[in-house]
Amino acid sequence: MDSANEKSVKCPSFDGKPEKYQIWLTRFKAYAAVHGFSPALADGGETDLPNNESDVISESTSDGKKAAAAKKRNAIAMANLTLAFTTESAMNWVYKAMTSAWPTGLAHRVIKAMNDKFKPTDTMSRVLEGS
């Protein structure tokens, strides 16, 4: 996709309302695919991501190039998640994804925490959801 078309795809916003989560997530994943950062949202994160955000990466090696690319995708994902959230309560997902190893946060942790809250997979939650 050329850059003119990429710019016409707007980052979907989310206000934290549970009933809007599934459609927001679907749209955000489509947005991530267009902008090339969807691997940063994958369950468990990218395997090429360094252990710490501050790790020095040598891009002269194949592994270093992969690590640098994964780090960049995560940064882009976190920036877009930050821009997508329109309320302080929704921004808490970003704050909770920040760690001492990754002070700007890990995008996959944001998505996992949101899925845990809005799309529970345990049997009791499903029973309560259906009542």
Image: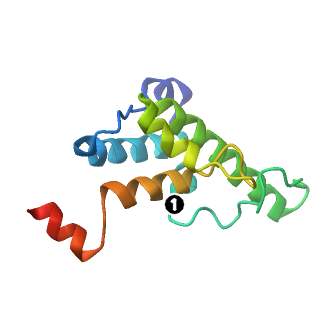
Q: Kindly indicate the quadrant of the structure image that contains residue 116.
A: bottom left
Q: Secondary structure at mark 1?
A: loop
Q: Kindly indicate the quadrant of the structure image that contains residue 65.
A: bottom right
Farthest residue in the bottom direction? 123
Q: Kindly indicate the quadrant of the structure image that contains residue 12.
A: top left
In this view of the protein, can residue 45 be seen by the observer?
yes
| Horizontal relation, residue 93 to residue 20: left or right | right
Q: Is residue 73 above or below residue 64?
A: above
Q: Which amino acid type is shown beneath numbered disc 1?
A: Ala
Residue 95 percent coordinates (x, y) = 57, 43
In this view of the protein, can residue 36 be seen by the observer?
no
Residue 3 percent coordinates (x, y) = 55, 28
Residue 37 percent coordinates (x, y) = 56, 47
Q: Which residue is mark 1?
A: 42
Residue 101 percent coordinates (x, y) = 75, 55
Q: Is residue 116 above or below residue 35?
A: below
Q: Nearer the viewer, residue 53 or 103?
A: 103
| Horizontal relation, residue 90 to residue 52: left or right | left
- At 24% across and 67% down in the image, what residue appears? 125
Judge the density around disc 1: few (<14), some (14-19), many (≥20) Cα neighbours within 10 Å: some
